[in-house]
Amino acid sequence: MERIVLEVDDALAKTWNNSSKKFRKEYESKITDVLREMKEEEFFQLIDKAGKIAKSNGLTEEKLNELLNEKD
């Protein structure tokens, strides 16, 4: 299985991280089902929209690379 990363707001991330393993597993399954049902075109439209939102919020390719290369 491969892992993907979804950007969410701080409150949602905190809720997710503080939830039980059982809860996360259940919702991971639901999210997977939704992604499987999406047509490829819809998926790419979703990704494009997310990219536009990120760009409008100041995320650049350089900033993204910095974030991805940060160590904990």
Image (spheres, rainbow, N blue to C red):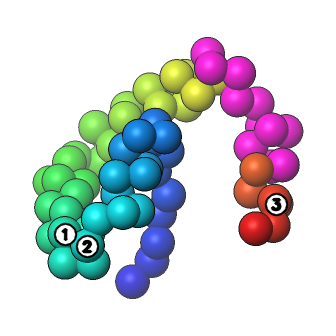
Q: Is residue 33 left or right of residue 19?
A: left
Residue flagged by tag 3: what amino acid is it? Asn
The percent coordinates of residue 16 (x first, y second) are 35, 57
Find disc 1 in the rendering and name its residue. Answer: 23
Tell which of 3 and 16 is nearer to you.
16
Q: Is residue 42 above or below residue 49?
A: below
Residue flagged by tag 1: what amino acid is it? Phe
Find disc 2 in the rendering and name its residue. Answer: 20
Residue 44 visible in the picture: no
User: Which residue is farthest bottom?
Assistant: 1
SS at mark 3 in the image: helix
The percent coordinates of residue 32 (x first, y second) are 23, 64
Q: Residues within 10 Å of mark 2 (few under 14, many from 20)?
A: few
* Residue ID at (19%, 78%): 22
Determine if the magenta segment contains residue 26: no
Residue flagged by tag 2: what amino acid is it? Ser
Asked if labels 1 and 3 touch by Cβ distance under 8 angstroms, the answer is no
Q: Which mark is residue 39?
A: none
**Which mark's residue is nearer the viewer, 2 or 3?**
2
Asked if labels 2 and 1 touch by Cβ distance under 8 angstroms, the answer is yes
SS at mark 1 in the image: helix
